[in-house]
Image (cartoon, rainbow, N blue to C red):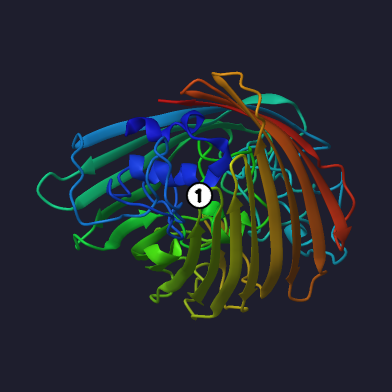
Amino acid sequence: MRTFLNPGRRRPRAWATWAVGIACAVGWIAPAAAADPSPVPAPADVADTDAAPEPEEPPPEEPATGLTPQVVPLVVTGYVDVGFAKAQGNGTSWPANYQPPMAGAPVDYDVDTFAPAVNSRGDVASTVPPPNTVVNGFLPRSAGIGGKPSFLLNTANVDLRYSAAELPVMVFTRLQLVPRLYGPIIGPGQTAGDNTRLVLEQAFGRITPLKNAELGISIGKFDSVFGIEYLENQANFRIGVTPSLIARYTTGQSVGVKAFYRVQIIPASSAISINVAATNNGTFVESLQGSSRSLTGVPVASGRLGYELNLERISVKLGASYSYGPRNDQTEGSGQKQTLYGFDARVVLPTLTVSGEYVHVNEQEADGMKVTGLDVFPMVTEFYAKGFYVQAAEELPLGLAPFRITIYGRYDHREAEFEGFADITVDRITGGVNVGIGENLVVKGEYLVNRELRGAPQVDNNVMTSSVVWTW
């Protein structure tokens, strides 16, 4: 099963299925599982599963039955993601010497700071703000390379999965080392000098209590249950290099409890699944809302309802997601709410996979200071956003084993507004190639064209990036 974690071994036509198989690899699924559930991601925490896997493909993503897998109790796997990237300008979305239209206003409210992404983590080339300006917590993590080309050790990842022999219980942890060099100018969440951050991205236990039902209950820190993009959070699952413009709202990890249930409708070649969670921070990424504790004392509820149709040469997967609860970035714990809803779809053909997702976000204004995974900031502002992406990936029928070549493209569109500030509309056109070599190596190259359509200043912030993923 360990090889399920190797993206080079999966067929590029079913990128979502890869994530599914990965889930199995980390024990998310009992071997008898069959199709594709909904939200639960990566190796240990897969979300949306794939239907009736072909003989050469691993089973779905979520747990299938209460039977205890007959596998080695402890399995250790992982990957190393090494990249090379170059962003235009200074590596940010701010023009040189930019000053906000309103004196003293946060400059991160005027641009999309997440646009110049360089890796699968969503890290950008730089988040250093213009001189003599302030920011207010609308920031991603940074690779710290600015506008200079650089090699990057994006992530060194280790997954550990333990499956109990006497009980239908699995324990999973994902540890990641993220080395970065910051300075001489540093931003929020950065310490000058060479630092390696240790990230506990997932850590949970899961029980599958029923022998004849695909039911799994997880407690700990796990991936989002919203939409489908979190299935590609890890570099060894992602067809491309960078996440979408809306990934910041839907792909974060959370601490709490989650339940997944799936029922197959065999006469109709279909299945229906539901994935629900109660967590500290909902589905936002860590740089926007931390997950390690609740600041309000009230959990955020999230869920996805999924439907899949699995025919001989085509599979169709549809989903609707919702999240509601208090913002976990407010120091006063006032309980002001955040609401998200979204829709997703995937169509998988023999060599072509087309997927898309839409999300709508509404965050109420709250009191006190703003707390994120990066730092503490002055205010918690009312916020609205909506956006979508559409992606297509085609495996070329070249017959060049052990090489597998897949070309892909994605279009992203995002509108956002902080109350009292300009309404910003941006989009992105992404294109690239993914080359699998044997069982343990994938090489990816990608170009991002970022465009400011309305509200934000025009700036050269396109990105050329690449990724070499070694899986073990």
Tell me if residue 453 comes above or below residue 435 in the rendering.
below
- Residue at point 62% right, 42% down? 123
Left or right of residue 354, residue 295 in this image: left
- Identify the image quadrant of residue 102: bottom right
In front here: 411 or 32? Answer: 32
**How far across and down, in percent of the image, does residue 457 sit?**
88, 55
Q: Is residue 254 at all visible to an observer of this figure?
A: yes
* Quadrant location of the C terminus in the rendered image: top left
Residue that appears at 54% across and 56% down? 228
Q: Secondary structure at mark 1?
A: loop
Q: Which residue is mark 1?
A: 312
Please state the horizontal and vertical placement of residue 71, each as a whole percent of the image: 20, 37
Residue 116 placement: quadrant: top right
What residue is drawn where x is 47% and y is 23%? 440
Vertical placement of residue 419 versus 441, above or below = below
Report which quarter residue 397 is drawn in.
top right
Is residue 132 among the parts visible in the rendering?
no
Q: Quadrant of the N terminus?
A: top left
Q: Nearer the viewer, residue 93 or 45?
A: 45
Relative to 30, 36 lies left or right: right
Task: Measuring from the top left, give residue 327's x and y in whole percent.
Answer: 52, 72
Residue 212 in percent (x, y) is at: 21, 62
How many residues crowd around disc 1 within 10 Å: few (fewer than 14), some, or many (20 or more)? few
Say which of 188 and 440 sits in front.
Answer: 440
In the picture as drawn, the residue positioned furthest to the left comes out as 166
Q: Residue at x 66, y 24 (%)?
A: 398
Residue type highlighted by circle 1: Glu
